[in-house]
Amino acid sequence: MKQIQLKSTITCPECGFRKEEIMPADACQFFYECTNCGKMLKPRKGDCCVYCSYGTVKCPPMQETGKCSC
């Protein structure tokens, strides 16, 4: 069984601020507000969530199966 990581560091594309967050284990997160500049992040085209677009670790569904289940 694969070990799923729940921590990912999100980097804001607007200001470059980085923050470690705990991802939801059973869902994708579609929006994330940067705690530094207030920019509302949305997934890039082709990505299922903000962690897949801006995080150091892909979301749990992607880690587990390699595809999004959201």
Image: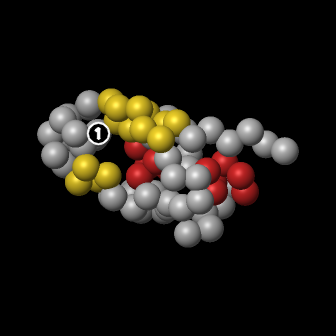
Looking at the picture, which amino acid does disc 1 mark? Cys
Viewer-closest of 30 and 21: 21
Quick check: 26 left or right of 56? right
Q: Residue 2: image x %, image y %?
A: 79, 42
Q: Going 50% across and 47% down the picture, which residue do you hit?
A: 23
The image quadrant of residue 43 is bottom left
Q: Going 41% across and 52% down the picture, which residue do you hit?
A: 50
Q: Going 29% across and 39% down the picture, which residue do you hit?
A: 12
Q: Is residue 47 visible?
A: no
Q: Residue 55: image x %, image y %?
A: 45, 40
Quick check: 44 left or right of 22? left
Viewer-closest of 7 and 40: 7
**Quadrant showing the N terminus:** top right
Q: Going 54% across and 61% down the picture, which residue do you hit?
A: 27
Viewer-closest of 34 and 54: 34
Dot 1 lies on which element? loop
Quick check: 59 left or right of 9? right
Q: From what the image shows, is residue 66 above or below residue 69? A: above
Q: Residue 14: image x %, image y %?
A: 21, 41
Q: From what the image shows, is residue 56 above or below residue 61? A: above
Q: Residue 60: image x %, image y %?
A: 61, 51
Residue occupying the far left of the picture: 37
Q: Residue under circle 1?
A: 12
Quick check: 55 left or right of 14? right
Q: Is residue 51 visible?
A: yes
Mark 1 Cα-neighbour bin, 10 Å: few <14, some 14–19, many ≥20: many
Residue occupying the far bottom of the picture: 70
